[in-house]
Every structure is written in C-alpha cells, then in structure tokens.
Amino acid sequence: MTTTLARWMPADLFRERFDRMLNQSFNEFLAPLGATEDVTNRRWMPAVDIRESDEALTLIAELPGLTKNDVHITMENNVLTLSGERKFETEEKEESYHRIERAYGSFSRSFTLPANVKTDKVEALFKDGLLSVTLPKVEEAKPRKIEIR
C-alpha cells in the first residue's frame, strides 16, 4: 500500500486558484463569440507573509499600485484587519485593452492574533508597495535564557 502526501493549501488560496481556472476556461470558451472579461468581477486578495521573531510578529502585505491612503488597518477583539481598494484606471483614449490580467477592487484580510501580542503597540510602515505591520510580543512571551547554578 502506498501513501500519497498532498500539500495543504489554505482555503482562500485554493478558492482563488480554482476561480482563476474557471474564469480562464470560461473566457476562452466565450472569446470566439466576442465576449470580454469584466474587470469588476475579478477578485483581488493581496499576498501576506507572516514571520515571527523573539520580539514580534510581522505581517508583510504586497500592495502594488496602492498608497498608504488606499489601505486601512483596524484591530478589534484581537483580530487585525487589512482592507482597501485598487481602482481600475479608466482613461479615455483611442486604445483598447486586449486582455486585463491585473485584478482590481476592494479587499479585506483578517488575522486572529495570539494573546501574547501587545495590541496597543502595533506599528505599520508602507514603502514601495509593501505594507509591514509589526506586532510586538509581551515580555512574558519572549524566550529568555535561564542560568543553571
């Protein structure tokens, strides 16, 4: 008997990939009929990396094309929420799009924080399309060295 291991994929990532596959298939099916993809139906969810050090948790979100004024960060009941919107630029020119692959629209990502985070000391920095949110840990949660006598 052989056992096959499957890589676990978060539900949001699975849904995003599945939606992309269905949309691509549907668009290829309709292309000969002259149908075009509707920009407003594209779902956008920015990628977020989470890393942990002895001192803090850090979330880094990719937000290309946005400014700090386009993004909102809220915290309620130990849940950190990043939200915002990337708007489709509609300039009237004599050019037309043949294909639009970048996603536009509003997004919201929520993260339940562990109890060992100082929620009143959260800091955020936005630079070059990356939002970095630092969540310092409480003193008791930090590892410390215990000397043996």
Image: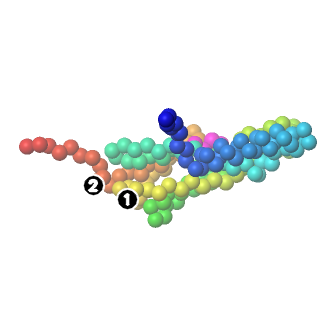
In the rendered image, residue 126 lying in the magenta stretch gets the answer no
* Majority SS type along the magenta span: loop
Which residue matches tag 1?
Answer: 115
Horizontal side, residue 4 vs residue 45: left or right: left
Horizontal side, residue 103 vs residue 98: left or right: left
Give the residue at x 47% y 57%. Answer: 112
In the rendered image, is residue 3 in sight?
Answer: yes
Instruction: Name the quadrant of the C terminus.
Output: top left
For marks 2 and 1 on the same chain, the one whose residue lies earlier in the sequence: 1
Farthest residue to the front: give it.
1
Alpha-carbon distance for marks 2 and 1? 11 Å
Q: What residue type is labelled 1?
A: Ala
Q: What residue type is labelled 2?
A: Glu
Label 2 residue SS: helix
Mark carried by residue 148:
none
Seen from the viewer's position, the closer of residues 27 and 77 is: 27
Label 1 residue SS: loop
The residue segment tinted magenta is 61-65
Residue 101: give x, y in percent of width and height.
74, 39
Horizontal side, residue 79 vs residue 142: left or right: right
Which residue matches tag 2?
Answer: 140
